Amino acid sequence: MGTLAVDLLGKALKNPVMNASGTLGYGIEIEPLWNIETLGAYVTKGLSEKPHHGNKTPRVWEERHGMINSIGLQNVGVDDFFSHYFPFFVERKVPVIVNFFGFSEDEYISCARKVPSHHLVVALEMNLSCPNIKKGGISFGKDAPAVHNIVRAVREVTPVPIIAKLTPEVKNIVEIARAAYEGGADGLTLINTMPAAVIDTRSRNMPLKGGLSGPILKPIALRAVYDCYKEVPIPIIGAGGIMDAEDALEFLMAGARAVEVGTATFADPFAMPKIISGLGEWLDENNCAGIAAITGIAHG
Ligand SMILES: Cc1cc2nc3c(=O)[nH]c(=O)nc-3n(C[C@H](O)[C@H](O)[C@H](O)COP(=O)(O)O)c2cc1C
């Protein structure tokens, strides 16, 4: 059988499949169904310097081709994650990507500072979709100079590799990706959710405004990966509507080194183990020695 192993920012992952941030709790919750070491790496729920309670319910809404969530970045805080949850990943020897956010540059910096440089911490994944409170709530990730500055500010306070996770809600994602790279990002995650809403015709109100994810996002995410691959010389993690191994292959061929799977787990909690075995079968059927070799092959 060909190997599913990939190198990501100098760390060897046993396969290129990981959960998308916020869609697999703190990892331990999935254990009654399958073991966390099945994944190439675990991505944390977005962590902040201090804990957050998040939004009122409803927080998730099923759409015809996806779902909308408005969790409100609820999390236990970075200190609690490392004292209570991280030892579980150390015990299982599972690489961890630490997704984190802030509502100001200072919050990003103080959170990043608290993340230890540990051999299992692959990278910090910066959620750049957050509103910048000091700039009237406009998201950091929508403006190239703001992305450059925030990445550079975090780069200065941590030796841990940085992955910039970008919002698709921009005119030119390549320009934003380049700004992240020039600010010091070592990798990119493409993409986060799109702003969306639902109307409940029975109650005649808008019960939920939030981020759209799932299959409806896939072509947009694929385009972002494809366009950034040639223009920005750092590894890309593809995310957005990956439901099966075929979808994952599309992202790898478009230029992703690894993939994150989110909404699929809500539809089928075994989606990720199935994707991993599906990729293994594909390698055998195609007489391919290793999955790493297919990154970017769609570019010819
Ligand atoms: C319930 C839920 C919670 C999420 N929480 C976060 C988060 O804390 N930080 C983040 O960067 N992205 C978060 N996301 C976005 C996902 O990580 C992912 O980028 C997006 O959902 C697209 O992938 P998918 O279509 O496979 O779900 C969340 C998505 C969902 C559905």
Image: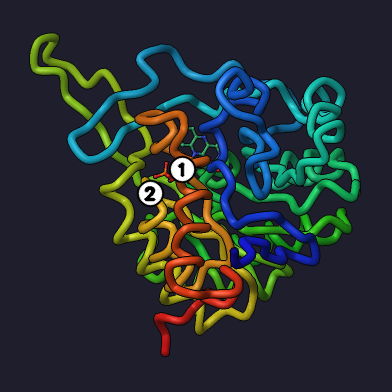
Task: Please identify the quadrant where the N terminus is shown.
Answer: bottom right
Q: Residue at x 70, y 21 (%)?
A: 76
Badge 2: residue crowd in 10 Å (few <14, some 14–19, many ≥20): some
Q: Is residue 230 above or below residue 28?
A: below
Mark 2 sits on what residue?
A: 244
Badge 1: residue crowd in 10 Å (few <14, some 14–19, many ≥20): some
**Nearer-the-camera pick, 246 or 234:** 246
As helix, strand or loop, the secondary structure at mark 1 comes to helix
Label 2 vs label 1: CA separation?
Answer: 7 Å
Q: Is residue 187 above or below residue 138?
A: below
Labels 2, 1: front one: 1
Answer whether residue 220 is visible to the viewer in this image: yes
Residue type at mark 1? Answer: Lys
Task: Please identify the quadrant where the C terminus is shown.
Answer: bottom left
**x, y percentage for residue 130?**
54, 42
Mark 1 sits on what residue?
A: 274
**x, y percentage for residue 231?**
52, 83
As helix, strand or loop, the secondary structure at mark 2 comes to loop
Q: Is residue 51 above or below residue 57?
A: below
Q: Residue at x 53, y 75 (%)?
A: 288
